[in-house]
Amino acid sequence: MKNAFIPYGHQSISESDVSKVSEVLRSEFLTSGPCVEKFELEFADKVGAKFAIAVNSATAALHLAMRVAGVKEGDRVITSPNTFLASANAAAYVGATPDFTDIDRVSHNLDPEELRGKWSTDIKAVVAVDYAGQPCDLPKIANIARANGAVVIEDACHGVGGGFEHNGKIWKIGGHEWADITVFSFHPVKTMTTGEGGMLVTNNKIWVDEVRRLRSHGVERREFFGLGADQDKEMCEKGPWYYEMQSLGYNYRLPDILCALGSSQLSRLECFIAQRREIVAQYNAGLSNIEWLTTPAVLHPGNKDLISWHLYTVEIDFPSIGKNRTEVMRELRDEGIGTQVLYIPVYLQPWYRAKFGYELGKCPVAETHYRKSLSLPLYSSLTTEEVERVIMAIKALGKARKI
Ligand SMILES: *Cc1c(COP(=O)(O)O)cnc(C)c1O
């Protein structure tokens, strides 16, 4: 009997998720109805933030973060090279220069000392990415950024529901004081999903109002300044229809249909995280003591039990098993196992090279990690047997070692 294919990531949709969405489909509002605020309030409560604003992707959330933080042309924004493109692209959307400082060898997150060493006065924001779910050293990063008047945006697309330890206390991602804005993604490969979707959380009330406006075309319904200097009396009348646009916004709304799915998935989040932690523990045990493979390590021991794992990325010394990564991925695929390489250092993308002149060698630690990295299947519905199958297939890679 052929084993079922194990993809590297997969959503978990329950019958109760389906029925929550169906309810909305039969209701009055498909978008901008009561499910949006409900999801936002529940999410803010879960992560310990004052405000949460639902948007239709984390990319949109990052873009809005740049807008409300006032990042603009001539500014520089630092992010990790070891991330998805969107973390950096958002800076370019507002005309700023996305730039990168190197990562540390253990967590593969932004190295605060590198950030400090490479600081320049035009840096207006830092996008700190919690790679694989492991939190960055936010207190240190915030210290450096804020001393220089820069804003800290935490890209927690991998880390929903996670936390970290600092000064003997436990802090939630989204609910601590060292990020000015935190963004989350609900893409299907992430820990919880709305199909497409994202969330921006902050404690800054002024930004909240601005994000809400920008999410919906920059339009405001409350009485504002008036359309302009029109002398025409009728043009100046502010009746119940009145709406006004003071800034250029977008359509970044997350529909009720998807917010209902979000609320339902959020109610299962603790369970998703626990299942992922168990899988990570099984991988760690099964893949320890392999000389050509390094399992993910936790930089700060206090964070060990607080991480919401999104990726399980191992480092493989490919030359020592006599196979390149393409061959390994093919071999695993033939065994019915999907893997991914996350991520190509963003600055090596053709657009970044052409636009900003970035070259190989810019962030050597990120490049070394990239050459060795392989992300194994990790999603909440993976069974113990399936994880064991992956472990056996990985171990077998080394058996045919060329001598
Ligand atoms: C998935 C992801 C994004 C983008 O999320 P979308 O919701 O697909 O826009 C941004 N940053 C990181 C680190 C991600 O993993």
Image: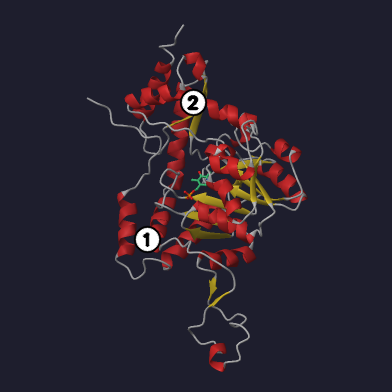
Tell me, yes or no, if residue 170 can be seen here: no
Q: Determine crowd level at label 1: few under 14, some 14-19, many 20+ residues with C-alpha closer than 10 A.
A: many
Q: Amino acid at mark 1?
A: Ile
Q: Label 1 belongs to which residue? A: 257
Q: Are marks 1 and 2 in contact (CB under 8 Å)?
A: no
For the residues marked 1 and 2, what is the alpha-carbon distance in whole angstroms? 38 Å
Q: Is mark 2 within 8 Å of ligand 1?
A: no
Q: Is residue 62 visible?
A: yes
The residue closer to the viewer here, 85 or 35, is 85
**Quadrant of residue 210 within the rendered picture:** bottom right
Q: Residue at x 57, y 34 (%)?
A: 304
SS at mark 2 in the image: helix
Please name whichever residue, 170 or 331, is drawn nearer the observer in this view of the structure.
331
Q: Taking 246 as reference, is 189 above or below it?
A: above
Residue at the image point whose x is 52% and y is 60% from the top: 53
| Residue 26, horizontal then vertical, whole percent | 29, 66
Where does the image place residue 234, in percent across and percent down from the top left?
Answer: 53, 92
119 left or right of 203 in image: right
Q: Residue at x 60, y 36 (%)?
A: 303
Find the residue positioned furthest to the top: 403
Q: Amino acid at mark 2?
A: Asn
Location of the N terminus (image quadrant): top left
- Colour setting: secondary structure
From the image, tell me which residue sits under label 2. Answer: 284
Left-right relation of 143 to 200:
right
Which quadrant would residue 259 be assigned to in this image? Answer: bottom left
